[in-house]
Amino acid sequence: MEAWLMDVADGFTKAFITGDRWKLYLKGLGVTLELTVIALVLGVILGVLVAVVRTAHDQQRPGRRNPLLGLLNVLCKVYTTVIRGTPMMVQLLIWAFVIFASSRNRTLIGAFGIGINSGAYVAEIVRGGLMSVDIGQSEAGRSLGLGYLDTMRFIVIPQAFKNILPALGNEFITLFKDTSLVSAIGGAELIYYAKAVGAKTFDVMYPYLGIACMYLAVVMLLTWLQGKLERRLRQSDRR
Amino acid sequence: MIDVKNLSKSFGDHLVLDGIDQHICPGEKVVILGPSGSGKSTFLRCLNLLETPTGGTITFEGTVITDPKVNIDQVRQKMGMVFQHFNLFPNMTIRKNITLAPVRTGLMKQEEADEAATALLKRVDLLDKADAYPNQLSGGQKQRIAIVRALAMKPKVMLFDEPTSALDPEMVGEVLDVMKELAAEGMTMVVVTHEMGFAREVGSRVLFMDGGHILEENEPHAFFSQPKNPRLQEFLSKVL
């Protein structure tokens, strides 16, 4: 028993303490979070744009179809179909080694790839949210003479936001964990450093268990924040 | 004011309106009666193009609004509409519900709109609810707010789509009172309703619709005392 404890302490020290290796993990975690934020922003912007284009296209008055909107709608459809129909790993490999093969900044390419991937899923979530708002709401807005965009901006989107928050939170958590794939294209995030430490000490157990704990801690924090935000938005219902 | 020619509307194979001709003059209070599924709501919703007609033309103040090139938002600013389910915006205060459209369409500045909202709320006796949210109001209160929200745009005509059908019986009166007041002020109104008393008292003309046609139209007294169409006779014998 004592020997085992010594073993644990030794492994732990080698994985985290010796040579200030914990700093490497922190650096990796920082990059992982950076990846998450960039991908998140990109994903949300893309997702909302695609969702608005697709909803606007579907809600056009017959006989007044806008050809530009039709073209955009086709592009959006192709985007969601291709992105949702191929593995993210494959997409990342294509971004890093085919399209941007000459670039060295693999972390940024990774953030870009994940953001584009996430956008397709966010688009479907947002579109569902927009459709979940009672049609009478937009009819009321339009009947008052408000334009389509104003009706969306002031009436439909604020109400949709509340409905999509749980699904969106879920998507964000998935995205955070998916950043681990960036290690496959050589991005220097959490897994990259864990592997590096493991290779040096010939013991991967502690580095891997350690980063698992780090991922878990961040996800628990995100879940808690999401719950808090939802509770606050619900409160406004019962005013 | 509103001129409807040969209006038809179908949903897929189902023909809901079949060649309606109708003229609504300024100051008229047209009440539309009929069984469910007769096309009366669809007719009303065609007037401000919430439903796009499949045939025929609608002219409003000289503009052919069924023309795809017409800016429908500008036309709708002059046509108020009140819905069966109120459709207040739950994410805004009552005051914001009323001022949003006048401000965003450039009809008024925020301060002017706030003043107008205060005056309108006083008129329906709900000024104390200005900063409340729709969910805190009763059905009757919501519908009165929905009426003044439409009035804030200073419309030339008001369209009512079964405004009392979703209300508790107790609350029907307060909404009808606001509508009667509005009628007395000379507002042009088109009302789809099941309130026979309102039709008789306020209507200047009553239409009976069934199967996508206007089967009978008359001034209210004769409409109720000497119905000629057998379908209308049957309808009245069931509801009166």
Image (cartoon, rainbow, N blue to C red):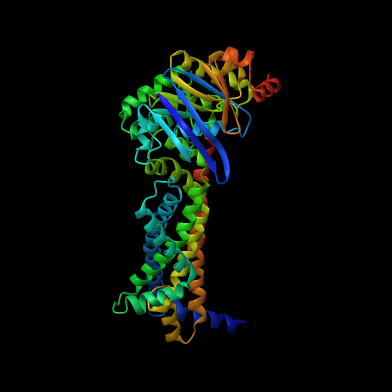
Residue lying farthest bottom? A202
- Relative placement, left or right, of B141 versus A99 is right
Disc count in the image?
Answer: 0
Q: Is residue B150 above or below residue A29?
A: above
Tell me where residue B215 appears, x and y as whole percent: 59, 26
Residue B49 visible: no
Point out residue A217 in the picture as x, y percentages from the top left corner: 50, 64
Vertical comparison of A10 with B100: above or below: below
| Viewer-closest of B148 and A102 | B148
Q: Residue at x 45, y 31 (%)?
A: B5
User: Is residue B232 positioned above or below B88 on the image?
Assistant: above
Instruction: State the quadrant of the N terminus of chain B.
Output: top left
Q: In which quarter of the image is the C terminus of chain B?
A: top right
Provide residue A117's location: percent of width, then percent of height: 43, 66
Q: Tell me if I can see residue A120 in this picture.
A: yes
Residue at 41% in and 74% down: A92
Residue at image position (70%, 20%) is: B237
* Residue A152 placement (x, y as % from top left): 41, 44
Q: Nearer the viewer, residue B128 or A91?
A: A91
Give the residue at x 37% y 44%.
A149
Compared to residue B228, the image places residue A135 above or below, namely below
Nearer the observer, B189 or A96: B189
